[in-house]
Image: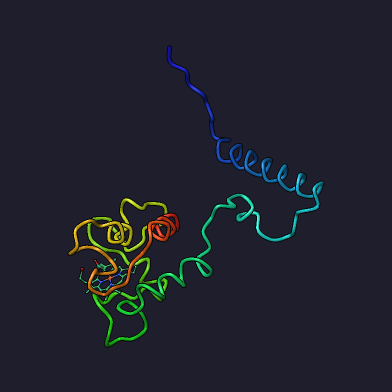
Amino acid sequence: MRVSIDFGPARGWRSFSAVSYRCACAWLLGTILGTTRPAPVALAADPAKVDFNFQIRPLLSDRCFKCHGPDEKARKAKLRLDLREGILKELEDGWAVVKPGNPAKSEMVRRIFATDEDDLMPPAKSNLKLSVAEKELLKGFT
Ligand code: HEC
């Protein structure tokens, strides 16, 4: 049997109202519990979201900027990880350095988890390393 649900032309509106209904619930609950602050609904919706400025940037700064930072002379692969444009830089075949929402197409993720020493970032001979938890953190940020 084929089950078909006809969302019709009202679909966008319906899903919108479903979302705001949920937000309203969260807001109400927050008000009752006294935890609601006027600011970020988006953050409240995803408390597990990794914070770029506090968690990611310091890590990149420590392990990557030596070769992918502000110092032009030391910069490798013309890649800057201190700038948003560099982090989001598009590569070939639909890949990007970091492809938001798609770690499978994020070269950064491929590089930090690489088992081939030629691909691994930071390079083994740099004596810089990422722990498994740090790799997962970076992956979670994509
Ligand atoms: C000691 C220097 C050094 C450090 C530190 C380093 N890299 Fe690299 N990186 C390189 C070099 C050299 C290349 C170019 C050769 C290659 O592709 O392997 C490169 C290439 C890359 C590329 C590929 C860029 C492209 O255009 O395809 C990515 C992504 C990358 N690095 C990410 C990182 C990340 C993330 C870190 C920190 C966790 C890091 N690198 C730390 C030297 C470094």
Q: Residue at x 33, y 86 (%)?
A: 71
Name the residue at 36% across, 77% down: 65
Quarter-of-image position of residue 78: bottom left
Q: Quadrant of the N terminus?
A: top left
Q: Nearer the viewer, residue 133 or 37?
A: 133
- Disc tally is 0
**Left or right relative to 76: residue 86:** right
Could you tell me which residue is drawn at 76 percent across and 44 percent down? 29
Task: Give residue 115's position: percent from left, percent from top.
Answer: 23, 56
Q: Looking at the rendering, in which quadrant would you find the C terminus? A: bottom left
Q: Position of residue 73 (x, y in %)?
A: 27, 88
Q: Which is nearer the eye, 28 or 138?
A: 138
Q: How is the image coloured?
A: rainbow
Quarter of the figure with residue 89: bottom left
Residue 3: x and y, percent?
47, 18
Q: Is residue 28 above or below residue 127?
A: above
* Side (left or right) of 66 relative to 32: left
Residue 56 left/right relative to 26: left
The answer to whether 120 appears left or right of 15 in the picture is left
Q: Is residue 74 above or below residue 127?
A: below
Residue 35 % position (x, y): 76, 53
Q: State ligand 1's quadrant.
A: bottom left
Residue 117 occupies which quadrant of the picture? bottom left
